[in-house]
Image (spheres, rainbow, N blue to C red):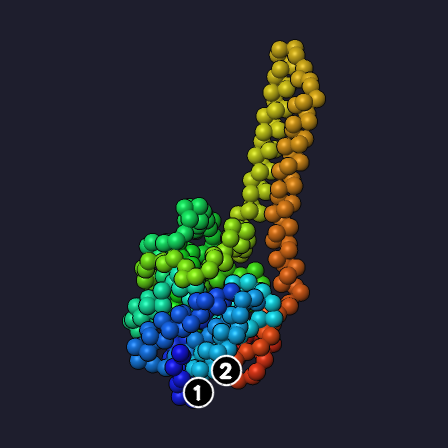
Amino acid sequence: MVETTDARSDAPPTFSVVAPVWNEVATIPHFYARCKQVLDTLGGTWEIVLVDDGSRDGSGDAMRRLCEADPRVRALVFSRNFGHQIAITAGLDHARGDAVVVIDSDLQDPPEVIAEMVGRWRDGYQVVYAPPIARDGETWFKRVTAAAFYRLIRRIASVDIPLDTGDFRLMDRVAADALRSMREHHRFVRGMAAWIGYRTTAVMYSRAARHAGETKYPFRKMARLAIDGITNFSYLPLQLATYAGFLVAGLSLLGILAAIVVRVFLGHELTGQATTLVSVLFLGGIQLIFLGVIGEYLGRIYDEVKARPLYLLDRSYNLDAPTVAGMKRTGNSGG
């Protein structure tokens, strides 16, 4: 049974918790209870902003029941699945707190860590991120690939993205508004949070296994997120085309010189269709690879030029407006 609270206050809350939801009907009540237990001890008003990213298991109804029982819970229901990073963005668009915590609703990120984050925020830090020191319930493959990706992107990115750090973080109002102002469609929020800068610190924690259900980030989505992260914060894939061009040109020059030496000094000719065929196929493969890389960047430009909303809402609960249209290029507090 969810405890009913007093009527909503018009004053903005001190703390906002933003949580994307996708097929988490079994977890939502437990997530709310643990967040409420922590938030009630922080000495300020609070709200929880749940964002249903097109769930098909009744998560929207579970969110509605929470909103009816506790007006401090606010909920947005997307018209379809727009993706985890867009769901975080929608929550930030509607979060009103002086400090905003982004956390997944599957309870792998323990809400109890929020208290320590708030302590660092009160010490004067504007962004508090949370790298896990342990990852219970994750396969070795996911741990290894995640570690490799974070080290790769930190090496090639134009900003210093913290190692092994997901989206679990606290941002004060200034940092949250700065992040909200960035409206690109292919979003890599943890990189964007690093790009805005501000006074930053870390809080370590142990990542738990999922409370219920299956992982919402299979390999395909992990690969897509990795590509978004690399293309958003590095031009290295494009620069590799130039490097490869110089390499192939250098090898070709060496081949020409070798052919001249063999012909002039040894009296032999280099013949054979196999050599020519292999060379042509090799160069063709290089060209196709980099055409694909250019296509990735060009596709992102095309998506930005279309200027579609990042998301659309089907319905909402405990917002000022019963239904809020998707955000476009300019932000809207939605509060």
Pick the residue in front: 331 or 2: 2
- Dot 2: within a 10 Å radius of its alpha carbon, few (fewer than 14), some, or many (20 or more) residues? some
Pick the residue in front: 230 or 78: 78
In this view of the protein, can residue 189 be seen by the observer? yes
Residue 136: image quadrant is bottom left
- The relative height of residue 265 versus residue 293 in the rendered view (above or below) is above
- The residue where tag 2 is placed is 318
For the residues labelled 1 and 2, say whether their Cβ atoms are less than 8 Å apart: yes
Residue 155, position in %: x, y? 44, 48
- The relative height of residue 192 versus residue 96 in the rendered view (above or below) is above
Tell me the number on the disc at residue 8.
1
Name which residue type carries label 2.
Answer: Asn
Name which residue type carries label 1.
Answer: Arg
In this view of the protein, can residue 328 be seen by the observer? no
Q: Name the residue: 62% across, 15% down.
A: 262
Q: Name the residue: 51% across, 70% down.
A: 59
